[in-house]
Amino acid sequence: MVLSRSAASVLLLAACFATGIAGGHWIALHTAAPSASPANAGDAAVATSVAESAGTADPTSTNTAATAAVTAPARTLPLPPRSEPIAAYYDELLAQARAGDGAAGRRLADDLYECANHSRRLDAVENLLDGGRGRGMRGGGGFAPAPGSGGPRSDGPRRNDPSFAERRLEVAERELQRVQETEKRCAGIEARQQVDPAELIRAAALAGDAQAQLCYALTPNDWKPDVLSPDWVQWSERWNQESPQMIRQAFENGLPEAAVVLSQMYTPWQPRDARPWNGRLGDDPYWAYAYNLVAQQWLGSPMQQRGGGNDFVARTAARLSSSQIAQAEAWAAAAGQRIRFQPRPAPGPGMDSICDRVRRAAGFR
């Protein structure tokens, strides 16, 4: 079989993803994400300059960021409560999604994803109860052995710590309760399912739903887990072309978490916890710094919780002139006035879908 150049890069992406990036069930803890590949050459051609639209263009910058975002029409009806069985509203949301309702499409994709993957969550519970020796999630794309460890991941001295064991049990009990709730919500849905949740989330993103745009762009292999299948290769090639623009559109549509991702996409360096998308749009300290300013303004202290945030700011600013720093600050201020950013959602029992976890994880450096 002869592979195209783009297909070969997608296979390389798969190889990187398969060597230790965690699955979507644990993204809030591990910030799982797709493996990066070089930004396709058409990015600059299809993008327009945000800085020019804000009147603060950086004359030395060659990279651009998109302004022409697809905005989803405002949804007038509330989404069904997550406590309801999915079968009770499946047909209604599917019809709305097919009519172009991005929020309905994202919600249904979220629900169907959870139904398809709740057994892996049960494996994760078994792994927790097994003391982290890798029995459950090892085969499902989750907790793999650390590179060079020669065996399953171990908690080392903490294993014999009673308080640590108690916390592990508490987490396992919460996860088991969620698995049981998911089983009840998903009862009877497999026989009725008519659509692929992967295509639903992509359609919702194309319809302009900001959270769907972020969710689709950062977790392609969670939506298409059959890595290296012909269907997956086709999906990933398309994702590789669309994902940078989706992140830009999520930013323009008001998700401040997208500013964190864009800042990382414009720099290959991170103080720690590097993301697979680091440097995907090249190495441009101006845009890395500018987007980071927006993220700090709207997300505040969560930017620092992973550590190294101040190092990133200092290192990036050191590569800019004083006039460039002033321009970036002016651009960030203008972006804050131009875009109606959504408030950071408060965590709660209704905020545990894959797209909710992606959004929470994306906002942490």
Image (cartoon, rainbow, N blue to C red):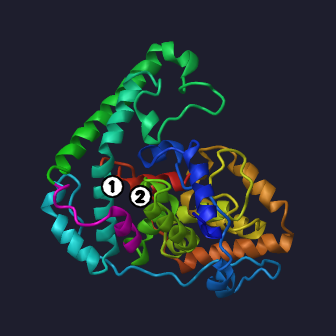
Q: Position of residue 54 (x, y in %)?
A: 65, 84
Task: Name the foreground residue: 170 vs 123.
Answer: 123
Looking at the image, which residue sits at the far front? 1
* Residue positioned 73% across, 57% down in the render: 268
**Mark 1, residues whose alpha carbon is within 10 Å: few (<14), some, or many (≥20)?**
many
Name the element at disc 2: helix
Q: Position of residue 223 (x, y in %)?
A: 41, 58
**Mark 2, residues whose alpha carbon is within 10 Å: few (<14), some, or many (≥20)?**
many
Q: Amino acid at mark 1?
A: Tyr
Name the disc covering residue 157, or none: none
Task: Name the foreground residue: 306 vs 221.
Answer: 221
* Residue positioned 62% across, 84% down in the render: 46
- The quadrant of the rendering that contains the N terminus is bottom right
* Residue positioned 39% across, 49% down in the render: 347
Is 141 above or below relative to 309? above
Cβ atoms at labels 1 and 2 below 8 Å apart: yes
Which quadrant holds residue 84? bottom left
Is 38 above or below relative to 122? below
Q: Earlier in the sequence, mark 1 or mark 2?
A: 1
The answer to if 201 sits in the magenta stretch is: yes
Q: Amino acid at mark 2?
A: Trp
Task: Name the foreground residue: 167 vs 293.
Answer: 167
On screen, residue 44 versus residue 134, left or right, reads right
The answer to if 122 sits in the magenta stretch is: no
Q: CA distance from mark 1 to mark 2?
A: 7 Å
Name the element at disc 1: helix
Task: Name the foreground residue: 256 vs 27.
Answer: 27
Name the disc covering residue 223, or none: 2
Q: Is residue 350 visible?
A: no
Q: Which residues are magenta?
A: 189-203
Query: Which residue corresponds to mark 1?
Result: 113
Is 356 above or below relative to 126? below
